[in-house]
Amino acid sequence: MEFTVKSGNPEKQRTACLVLGVYENRRLTPSAEQFDAACGGVLSNLLRRGDLEGKPGQSLLLFNVPEAVCERVLLVGGGREREVDDRRFRQILTHAATALNETGATEAMVYLTDLAVKGRDLHWKIRQIVETVEETQYRFDALKSKKDAPRRPLRKININIPGRKEQSDSEQAIREGAAIAAGVKLARDLGNMPPNLCHPAYLAEQAQALTGEFSALQAHILEESEMRQIGMNALLAVSQGSAQPAKLIRLDYRQGPAAQKPYILVGKGVTFDSGGISLKPGEAMDEMKYDMCGAASVLGTLRACVELQLPLNIIGLIAAVENMPGGQATRPGDIVTSLSGQTVEILNTDAEGRLILCDALTYAERDEPAAVIDIATLTGACIVALGRHPHGLFSNHPPLAHALQTAAHASSDRVWELPLWEDYQEGLDSNFADMANIASSRDGGAIIAACFLSRFAKKLHWAHLDIAGTAWKTGKTKGATGRPVPLLTQYLLDRAVETSSQ
């Protein structure tokens, strides 16, 4: 999809489809009012007749409007003006993009930037248009023998801006939105791949493919023999029941000053999680292919950052394994020595994500990072606590937590911080090792998992994002979401702004 910005009167736009907003109670937006006045009140007459009320989810397609030079006009309902917030704006955009696809128009001029969104500026609205349109266009049909493509797909969106003084910043908003959308698409594609094709070696191949596409990226893949040699026994304990060997994937993006400490993203890459010996129930087990969505988000975020040419040093670490109940599988009761030297009693082999992440966090220490963020579909308990809207956020460094919350607000990719109080740590006590990998009680499961990881992040400014509820959707809309690529990219965009202002 091609996106451009353009200023001008709506009635003078030679376009296949002009998109205008209508608030509830049949109130026209400013651009719709301007168009109506220039075209003899045609819109007002239609609204008075009751053809459209302006409610969310409503739209009306018009042809051959008198005095207009466009081929079509698409009126889109915006709801009550005072109720247009982030969520409602994205809903309006989604409906508009879906309706546009059904018109047969290959390009459109969109005037939805004049919708008043609480606390949001033009830059934000343009970026949301780009991201939402691309999300609406997304299809995963690579493995279908028959593709369900629109008859005349939408190819170009022109976005209205007030004038030339807004052009430079608006074009930057398009660049940001397009880069994030490309990163989200990559993450969704990887998440939606079936586990017989998307295994640890496949993830390594995708990382190497990115280095072929972008010369600023370098990849290094640690094999099991190297991991065993340096002592990553917690990670290897997860993979030993599978015929698929584990991979530790490292991607380096070094475009900041040589002395600048890197930002490290650590992704959980369990390409299929059967639960191991602690076997999961069969219902919805197919969705355990999404247990590598943390890894997918790292690759997606790095892609976005490279496209934006951020002046930062960024490292992506992906612990890629498959958790299977094979003859060599780890048993409940086994004790392993992690890369940090701490010993772990594995009481449940289905609490495997924390085992691969703890070794990856220790491995991250050697780069003396500015900050480390791990991203993992870690606990069903996080879904119980927060549902499927925000990511669970944990951190041992308040400035890092605040920076992620700021980025979450800016990107509309929400987080909610949960505590890491010492009170919870005793739940990990073990009679036989330094710690257990689960607590005896199910209380506060997401917090207990984060507490486990915190024991391996004491030397780091560290944050943990539990994306178990946000990485994919279930039911009729089942599929990977690509989150939290927007959040992570915004966090790094903010760091780049900080760097340039120093």
Image (spheres, grey):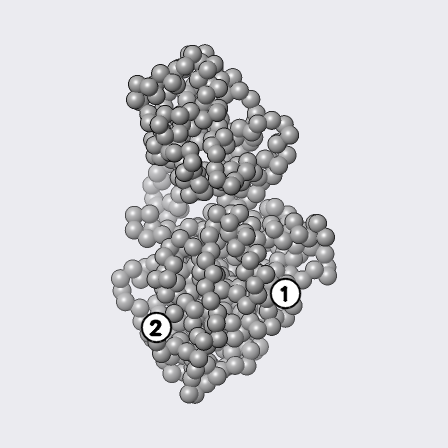
User: Residue 272: which numbered mark, if any?
Assistant: none
Residue located farthest toward the bottom when viewing the structure as drawn: 432
Mark 1: amino acid: Pro
Which tag, 2 or 1, sits closer to the chain's start? 1
Task: Tell me where residue 314 appears, x and y as whole percent.
Answer: 62, 58
User: Is 362 situated above or below 478?
Assistant: below
Q: What residue do we see at 45% from left, 64% from top?
A: 418
- Residue 121 seen in this snapshot: yes
The residue to which callout 1 is attached is 369
Q: Mark 2: which secondary structure?
A: loop
The residue most toward the front is 82
Residue at 31 percent across and 22 percent down: it is 51
Front in this rendered view, residue 245 or 303: 303
Q: Position of residue 263 (x, y in %)?
A: 61, 60
Which marked residue is nearer to the observer: mark 2 or mark 1? 2
CB of mark 2 within 8 Å of CB of mark 1?
no
Residue type at mark 2? Arg
Crowding at mark 2 (Cα within 10 Å: few <14, some 14-19, many 20+): few
Q: How many marks?
A: 2
The CA span between labels 2 and 1 is: 33 Å
- What mark, if any, has residue 442 been given in the picture? 2
